[in-house]
Image (tube, rainbow, N blue to C red):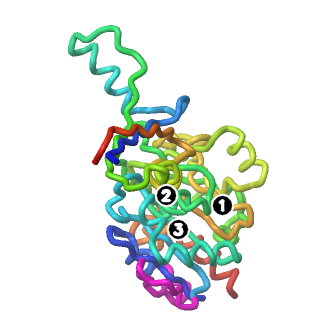
Amino acid sequence: MKFGVIQFPGSCDERDALAAAARVGDAVLLWHRDRDLRGVDAVIVPGGFSYGDYLRAGALARFSPIMVEVERFARHGGLVLGICNGFQVLCEAALLPGALLPNTSLRFVCRQVDLIVVNAHTSWTGACARGDRLSIPAKHQTGRYWAPDPVLDELEANDQVVLRYATGNGFNGSSRDIAGVCNKAGNVLGLMPHPEHAVDPLTGSADGLRLFESAALIAA
Amino acid sequence: MRARVLIRPKAGILDPQGQAVERVLPALGFEGVRNVHIGRLVELDVEDPAHLPAMCEQLLANPLVEDYEIVGTGEA
């Protein structure tokens, strides 16, 4: 299993994503100006502030050369995980439905949150069971997931809501406590909390590793 | 042509920036202020203003959550 982690100018979580992926497979860094995914089996769009988050979070990164390849890869069923800023990039690229708006508090919030696995049949949650509780850190100012109500209804009907904040754990005002959504096929997942920061009990939780293990199961 | 693009949060989407400003104004003694919304202003010189709507749709605004209004302001 070979993971590729994209580095944009302003990315800041690509090293943790590489380290997390390297626990379950090989991991290489991909540069935003490249047009080559180097034969990876899965692409991770990491957290940070790509291109300074100028204009809107994720809006400029979405047009970087490597994203052309990521879009092609995703549409052919390739595994793609967008974490935090990566989730914003995937929404801007319309690989995932909806948008991320500023937290209702307008504050940057950094805290450990409990997530509930709502769909354990995606490429990134296959190592989990429905109802599992994952303790993972979240740290963002622009994480209020929003989509029009008919779209939210459709996402729920299609089982595209993959992760929700557990009761009392939501802090950003997301519609229906949504923390992560996938595309219809289930190969592209975006979430605001950071599984790559929760891969070793030494730092409080290794629950985030389950997402990387899920992807490795697919490739096996 | 010098153009201005006004970008606003779509009606019905919670705008916490607007709400915060709306709450602060009465504290300064400015009563009777309602429906405060905060958006973005993009100013640009364009050779072909016909490109502006596509620029807005593809980049300057996120049409899912924002409305945009193109305001021409004369020669560059």
Tag on residue B30? none
Letter of the chain that mark 3 sits on in the rendering: A
- State the residue in front, A171 or B8: B8
Residue drawn where x is 50% and y is 41% of the image: B66
Are labels 1 and 3 on one chain? yes
Q: Which residue is mark 1?
A: A182
Chain letter, disc 1 residue: A
First in residue order: circle 2 vs circle 3: 2
What's under tag 2, amino acid-wise?
Answer: Gln
Snapshot quadrant of residue A72: bottom right
Crowding around mark 2 (Cα neighbors within 10 Å: few <14, some 14 to 19, many 20+) is: many
Residue B60, position as x, y percentages in the image: 44, 51
Local SS, label 3 = loop
> What amino acid type should be assigned to the residue bearing mark 1?
Cys
Give the labeled residue for mark 3.
Answer: A208
Is residue A71 left or right of B17 when viewed as pictured? right
* On screen, residue A98 above or below A106: below
Between circles 2 and 1, the one closer to the viewer is 2
Could you tell whether A181 is left or right of B2 in the image?
Answer: right
How many numbered marks have been drawn onto this rendered protein structure?
Answer: 3
Q: Position of residue A129 (x, y in %)?
A: 71, 63
For residue A135, say whether it is visible.
no
The stretch in magenta equals A20-39
